[in-house]
């Protein structure tokens, strides 16, 4: 476990994800995206779905943060929401498993504490990453025993909708770094430029995750088009 954490220290983790309906939605393409990220110097990969993770692991030997995005009806928790997804990810060999660690109830009716204890009971040695949306949730995830905490869902919950990390506002991330005692803090969410990545690393986070700014060409193209149209 410590070896994996050491391997990603102060490094870039590239999120290689393309959802259903997106142009690059293909395990083959995600595998090549991960290979390109490795050749560019990435220290780890974040990936969604069993098929993508298995293909990525065929292409690179970098640590993988595995997730499964699964929607259950109207429930808002969809990042690795139940033990079914945890079990599936364990079969992929993902070195780290990330899950929604907000205060919201999960699709099976369990709260975060119950879910966490169920994971630890079945898989005591897996590295667990808490995707949170607030400082309070980060503190709670740290107290439960999560190995990694990240503000991945800051701006994506009802309470934080529209908020994001940007050039002028690292306050939430800064506070999380200050109050989390045991878990490693990883910066994730709207890290859209190398300058932002460098700035958040200087806050003393353990590593930085970048996704759309590297691996979603439709989003990158739109940024250029929007700039040209101003």
Image (cartoon, rainbow, N blue to C red):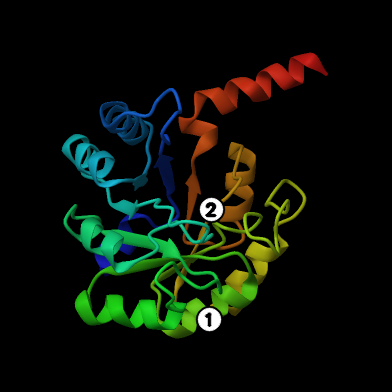
Front-lying residue, 118 or 190: 118
Residue 182 appearing in the image: no
Q: Secondary structure at mark 2?
A: loop
Front-lying residue, 136 or 183: 136
Front-lying residue, 61 or 163: 163
The quarter of the picture where the C terminus appears is top right
Where, by quadrant of the figure, is residue 179 drawn? bottom right
Q: Is residue 190 above or below residue 174?
A: above
Q: How far from the left and from the top, in percent, is residue 155?
A: 66, 55
Q: How far apart in space, not on screen, are marks 1 and 2 (Cα)?
A: 18 Å
- The numbered mark at residue 20 is none
Residue depicted at 23% across the width and 40% down the height: 51
Q: Earlier in the sequence, mark 1 or mark 2?
A: 1
Q: Residue pushed farthest right?
A: 230
Relative horizontal placement of residue 52, taking residue 143 as reference (left or right): left
Relative horizontal placement of residue 4, taking residue 136 as reference (left or right): left
Q: How far from the left and from the top, in percent, is residue 45?
A: 35, 45
Q: How far from the left and from the top, in percent, is residue 13?
A: 41, 47
Relative horizontal placement of residue 41, taking residue 222 as reference (left or right): left
| Mark 1 vs 2: CB contact within 8 A | no
Judge the density around disc 1: few (<14), some (14-19), many (≥20) Cα neighbours within 10 Å: some
Judge the density around disc 2: few (<14), some (14-19), many (≥20) Cα neighbours within 10 Å: many
Residue depicted at 32% across the width and 53% down the height: 66
Where is mark 1, residue-wise? 140
Where is mark 2, residue-wise? 188
Residue depicted at 57% across the width and 74% down the height: 137
Residue depicted at 54% across the width and 23% down the height: 218
Q: Residue pushed farthest front?
A: 73
Q: How far from the left and from the top, in percent, is residue 166?
A: 70, 47
């Amino acid at each position: 476990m410590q070896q994996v954490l050491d391997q990603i220290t102060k490094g870039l983790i590239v999120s290689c994800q393309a959802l259903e309906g997106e142009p690059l939605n293909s395990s083959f393409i995600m595998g090549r995206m991960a290979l390109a990220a490795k050749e560019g110097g990435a220290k780890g990969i974040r990936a969604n779905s069993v098929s993508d993770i298995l293909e990525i692991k065929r292409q690179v030997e970098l640590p993988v943060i595995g997730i499964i995005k699964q929607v259950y009806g109207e429930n808002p928790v969809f990042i690795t929401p139940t033990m079914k997804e945890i079990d599936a990810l364990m079969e992929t060999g993902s070195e780290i498993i990330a899950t929604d660690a907000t205060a919201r109830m999960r699709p099976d009716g369990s709260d975060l504490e119950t879910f966490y204890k169920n994971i630890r009971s079945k898989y005591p040695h897996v590295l667990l990453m808490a995707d949170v949306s607030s400082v309070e949730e980060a503190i709670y995830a740290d107290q439960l025993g999560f190995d990694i905490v990240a503000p991945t869902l800051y701006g994506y919950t009802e309470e934080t909708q529209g908020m994001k990390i940007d050039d002028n506002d690292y306050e939430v991330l800064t506070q999380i770094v200050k109050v989390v005692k045991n878990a490693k803090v990883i910066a994730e969410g709207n890290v859209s430029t190398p300058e932002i990545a460098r700035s958040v690393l200087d806050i003393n986070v353990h590593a930085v995750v970048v996704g759309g700014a590297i691996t979603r060409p439709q989003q990158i193209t739109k940024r250029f088009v929007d700039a040209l149209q101003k």
